[in-house]
Image: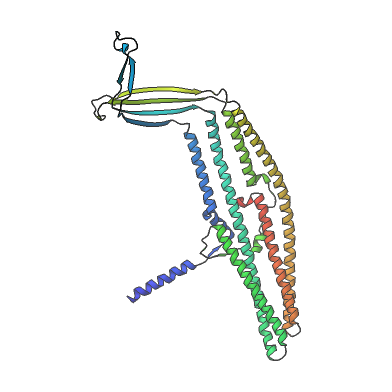
Amino acid sequence: MENSKLAVGILLLLSQFSFAQTTSFSLEDAKSYALEHNIAVKNADMDITIAEHQKRETIAMGLPQANITGSFNNFLNLPVQVLDASFFNPNAPAGELVSFRAGTDYSSSATLNVNQLIFNGSYFVGVQLSKKYTEMQANAATLTQEDVLFNVIQTYELAAVSKANVAFMDSIVTLTQNLVEKQQNYLELGLMLQEDMDQLNYGLFSAKQSLTQAKLQYNNALELLKFSMGFPMDQSIEITGDPNKMIESPKIESGDIHSNLSFQLMADQVTLSEFNVKNNKAAYMPTLNGYFQHGYNAYRNEFNFFNSDLDWFSQTSWGLQLNVPILSSGQRYYKTSQAKLALLKNQNSLEQMESSLTMQEIQAKNNLTSARSNYELQQENVRLAQTIYENQVTKQEIGKGNSIVVTQKYNQLVMAQAQLVGSTIELLNAQLALDKLYNNIIKN
């Protein structure tokens, strides 16, 4: 019994451990996870399926349509018919009428109807449009994937930079902590003023505060990353990416703006407008439908429709129905005119988007060049500030430094590091913006 309790306890501990374990993600892992689990991507995939079903629905409209209808009637009062009496008796006085109730108390019918569309211009346009619409929906789904991956990459890079910043601030805390511990001995021996010691402790507290802030930024970045990936918010993740390697990895800095997904969607909108014009022009064309009908009718004075000895009367017919548009009092003309104007507007919008993307391309390349230059300068600035700070710490350790100067150099280093963090994020975002412009996010 005791062994059973022990086994259960071990299993509970293991289950808690597995629930609390942290999942590590590289950037590629995070992107793959997002494409599989993000809700927006799932909905976009369902939109493609819906479009495919709509295409099949449209095609089915031109195939034979069959249905069976049935009816049952019970006349509580048979309808009264009136005829001239001479219909029954040639000798009846002129103008004399005879009334009688016609029909039976019960009647029933069953009819098979088959309809077939033979020619309809709007139908053929609709079939073409439905096929094209499926492709358009696929483009829209790709744009959704791009937006999701853009957010994942952006938040992942932010988390990677924040993680590197935590490591840097932690090293500064360790360096400052070691300095304070060493200087404590000088204070106890009376070789150092309490005021100088307080200044060093103030620097240590500032370093710890900066480290706490850096950890907060990192944790918040991880939460944003989980949300953009579609990862459970109640579970923990860790990242393995190095921001320096992300910056150093080969980048594509040229491409064709016409491959931009937003441009392609606008082009799809132009195509939709073209089909709308075709559909309105098709309204001028005649339509032709065929039908086949076969039915049975029964009339009874008693409810005995299931008696096989009594007759059901059959009726069969087929035919064609032609509808030729002649006059709509200008309705079709103005409707077509509106469709043509809508097409011109969308063509103008496409041209405007092309100009806008060209401008964005120039700006994105300029931003990338500026961000890279600023990043390289800030890297050198941090290396220089760190060397100055470490030298000042060394002087303080051997009694040749000044605690106030140490604090000043520390503040200088922290400011330089903050500027490096900002320039790193700026550079990564600039490259990411150019990748999105050229549709390289999906390609990569």
Residue 71 is situated, as x and y percent measured from the top left of the image, at: 34, 31
Q: Nearer the viewer, residue 26 or 221?
A: 221
**Residue with the most extreme top position:** 91
Q: Nearer the viewer, residue 95 or 260?
A: 95
Taking 255 as reference, is 186 above or below it? below
Quadrant in the picture for the N terminus: bottom left
At 55% across and 61% down in the image, what residue appears?
226
Residue 306 is situated, as x and y percent measured from the top left of the image, at: 25, 30
Residue 321 is situated, as x and y percent measured from the top left of the image, at: 47, 23
Taking 91 as reference, is 140 above or below it? below
At 70% across and 81% down in the image, what residue appears?
200
**Residue with the most extreme bottom position:** 189
Taking 337 as reference, is 349 above or below it? below
Q: Is residue 400 left or right of residue 307?
A: right
At 58% across and 48% down in the image, what residue appears?
142
At 74% across and 85% down in the image, what residue appears?
399
Q: Nearer the viewer, residue 33 or 296?
A: 296
Residue 129 is situated, as x and y percent measured from the top left of the image, at: 56, 36
Q: Quadrant of residue 209?
A: bottom right
Taking 325 as reference, is 361 above or below it? below
Q: Is residue 29 visible?
A: no
